[in-house]
Image (spheres, rainbow, N blue to C red):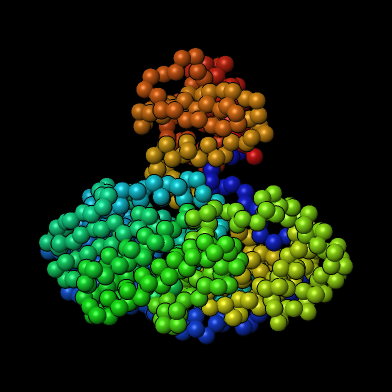
Amino acid sequence: MKLRLGALYVAIALAGCGEPPESIEPSVIATSGNDALVAHSQVFEQRIENPAPGVYVAIGYALANSIWIDGEDGAIVVDTTESRGAAEAVLQEFRRYSDKPVKAIIYTHNHADHIMGASVFANGDDVQILSHETLPKHVARVTNVLLPTIETNAMRMFGERLAEGGEAIINDGIGPELKQIGAKDGLGARGYLPPNRTFNDRLDLDIEGVKLSLIHAPGETDDQIVVWLPDLRVLLPGDNVYKAFPNLYTIRGTPYRDVRKWSESVRAMAKLNPQIMVPSHTEPVVGEANINALLTDYADAIQFVHDQTIRLINEGLRPDEIVQRIQLPQNLAKHPWLQPFYGTVEWAARSVYSGYLGWFDGDSVDLFPTPKRTKAARLIALMGGVDAVLSEASRYLKQDPQWAAELADYVCTADSSNTRARELKASALRAMAEVEVNPNARNWYLSEALELEGKVVFEPRPTDAERLAYAQTFPIENVLELMTVSLNPAKSAGVSASVEFVFPDQSKRFLLTVRNQILLIDRLNEPAADAVRVTVNVNDWVALVTQNDSLPAALASGRVATDGVSDLPALLKFLAMFTD
């Protein structure tokens, strides 16, 4: 039996449709990309910079920078890169400047490129790990609930499969490239360590003689913090500032990023009057006047998009109309730190709209729209049939590849086996990638083109031993939460049943109840009366739900045990509701 509980092996429907094409070749131009994006790569040339006494920043070794702060008898590391492999390379470079042991690790926020190399820097020692109090919740949300979708979307956005299909990443906008999710050379190994000290608004510390303040500054994430070194007047802004227009919305998927709060956080950073700013992406900035001007413009650009989107909403405009109207003021549009190398004004405006008003744009036809496949078939008929639509797509391939892609997509949607439509859509996506300055869009265009051509497949990595060990570090509550979103509604229709799960290694027990095609989880202090009961250690249960163990083998060995013979059939019937 395959349980439907492991987010790491949930089946993901592939983008595109039908069988792979045979004739479309990758574009030579698409591997070189937009000139501006190529020039932007200079920001990420590998180096260690020393912008302030005892402060070292590793640039270009991973998607995110890692920052080393030397103390009296130990060091502090701010952000730890995306994997153990990347962290090892960075630590080796830091060791050229300091041999002091790491005494504290600070996570500026929950994104993987900042937290997954921590175990390398900790090196098994008792290290203080600090973050905002909500960081563990955000890590658990991605790891246990949304991993299949977030993981595959991130692969597309960061271009992690491009090399397999004969394409190349230019850069990922805020770093050279991400080698974490799909890496097969050890770079994907995760070394996240949960924080052992958290705070809410502000935490003032003295670590190894270094005075620092950790300040909550919501922006790219709700748990974002900045690090302030008052004696050195050094600001570490995390991901609230980087040398690109901010990713006020990310196409890989995210909860609403409060744009207004982000601008307020940047203004609050400017009020500290830093002399040196060391971001977690891109290069340091020196000089109080330079930093103040930069942060002011950055905050103004964010607020402009927010305020103008709201103004146009109140004029009755819908998202497609709003994005045609919003343009940054000329001085901000030309600003070197506000180029669309990561976020875009258009995506940000759409996100502000949905963040305030949700998905409905006010047009009645969007309340219960015609299903996409039905709509596509009817439009194709109106346009004269498949051949006419694809001929028109071919005609627009060079002059308007976006329109060509949309026309080809109608045919893909209506007939998933149409090879010509796949070829045309892939060609259109490649044409858009050739001139795209935004690496997120470029990577996604090329990734989907490769999918359409059958050259790459996007799916979550299997739960190997390394990933199993990582999954086993989370509290059992997080694993059980995954079950709530894995219940098969067809198999649970009309069912009302409960099973008590006892986890003796964590001294916890829970009553899991299925009713009305949902799963409820209740923490118990005492055994439930007359309940089917199963006893299993947490690590064994995680191994089962990630398919690193089989239920028959676990039952036979006693790793999973039921109270009585009659409980076993009831348990099997209960678990069957979570199968594909």
Left or right side of 412 for 277? left
Along the line of sight, which residue is nearer the eye, 567 or 337? Answer: 337
Identity of the residue drawn at 18% across and 61% down: 212
Identity of the residue drawn at 49% across and 56% down: 355
Quadrant position of residue 510: top left
Along the line of sight, which residue is nearer the eye, 78 or 562? Answer: 78
Q: Give the x, y percent position of residue 383.
A: 84, 67
Along the line of sight, which residue is nearer the eye, 496 or 207? Answer: 496
Query: From this viewpoint, is residue 495 visible?
Result: yes
Q: Give the x, y percent position of residue 213.
A: 20, 59
Quadrant position of residue 237: bottom left
Identity of the residue drawn at 16% across and 66% down: 230
Along the line of sight, which residue is nearer the eye, 230 or 308? Answer: 308
Quadrant position of residue 97: bottom left
Left or right side of 454 for 182? left
In the orientation shown, which residue stands out farthest toward the top? 530
Query: Relative to 367, does residue 559 appear above or below in the rendering?
Result: above
Left or right side of 351 for 19? right
Query: Relative to 514, does residue 103 appear above or below in the rendering?
Result: below
Q: Give the x, y percent position of residue 154.
A: 52, 61
